[in-house]
Amino acid sequence: MSIENIKKMLLDSVDAKTKSAELLAGDIQRCAEISAESLKNGGKLLFCGNGGSAADSQHLATELVVRLSDKFDRPALKAVALTTDSSILTACANDFGFESIFSRQIEAIGNKGDILFAISTSGNSLNIINAVESAKLKGLMVVGFLGGDGGSLKTLVDYPIVAPSIDTARIQECHITFGHIIIAVIEDILFSKK
């Protein structure tokens, strides 16, 4: 691969984030505010996704439970990645099908006032769609980190945040950035001494 191709990939990543800044800053702020409100009221944030989005789910839940910024000496915040329990994932996939691995967990631990972050680069993953439908039945609000045209999930979630790219890698880079910013805003709302 040429140095020019590498530069193009870097610039495409910058371009996706620049477009996100122009188009999505208000949506990101609103999602941070509703998340902070949920946590303040005893709710929790749930995360689900496949592949790289599963890794993002774990990453973001970790930042909430542990911390994102060391400028806040704060308590742990309630967050769960639904992507991490291999026994639940494999038992559910075996007994009910892969499309139920997240919805079944939401049925078990989701409560009204919680927020689900449904992460899907295509917006069309059946197990994520089922998770969103389960969340709605339980009274959860749903944020969608999506890409491309948003797919089927764009109209199913309460807050679609659609990365302005059709390249999976660039979409994933945007998603982790959106998550970091939301958590930074949550920490600021809940723990800054103003």
Image (cartoon, grey):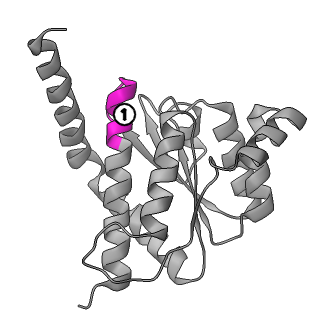
Give the image location of residue 76, x and y in percent: 49, 77
**Residue 80 location (% of width, % of height):** 60, 61
Q: Which residues are magenta?
A: 164-174
Q: Is residue 99 left or right of residue 11?
A: right
Count how many numbered circles sit on residues in the image: 1
Question: Where, by quadrant of the figure, is residue 181 drawn?
Answer: bottom left
Q: Nearer the viewer, residue 90 or 37?
A: 90
Q: Residue at x 13, y 9 (%)?
A: 2
When the figure is inspected, residue 113 is found, relative to residue 121, above or below; the finding is: below
Residue type at numbered disc 1: Ile
Q: Which residue is mark 1?
A: 171
The quadrant of the picture occupied by the N terminus is top left
**Along the viewing direction, whichever of 94 and 103 lies nearer the viewer:** 94
Which residue appears farthest toward the bottom when viewing the image? 193
Against 166, residue 101 (above or below) is below
Relative side of 121 to 164, left or right: right
Residue sitting at x 69%, y 70%: 112
**Residue in the image at 35% along x and 75% along y:** 187
**Outermost residue to the right:** 95
Q: Residue at x 51, y 51 (%)?
A: 58
Residue 26 coordinates in the image, percent (x, y): 30, 58
Is 25 drawn above or below residue 113 in the view shown?
above
Q: Indicate left or right for 82 with 119 as reference.
A: right
Vertical order, 25 against 102 (above or below): below
Residue 70 found in image quarter: bottom left
Rendered image quadrant of residue 51: top right
Q: Quadrant of the C terminus?
A: bottom left
Q: Secondary structure at mark 1?
A: helix
Instruction: Label the magenta part by its dominant secondary structure.
Output: helix
Asked whether 1 falls inside the magenta stretch, the response is: no
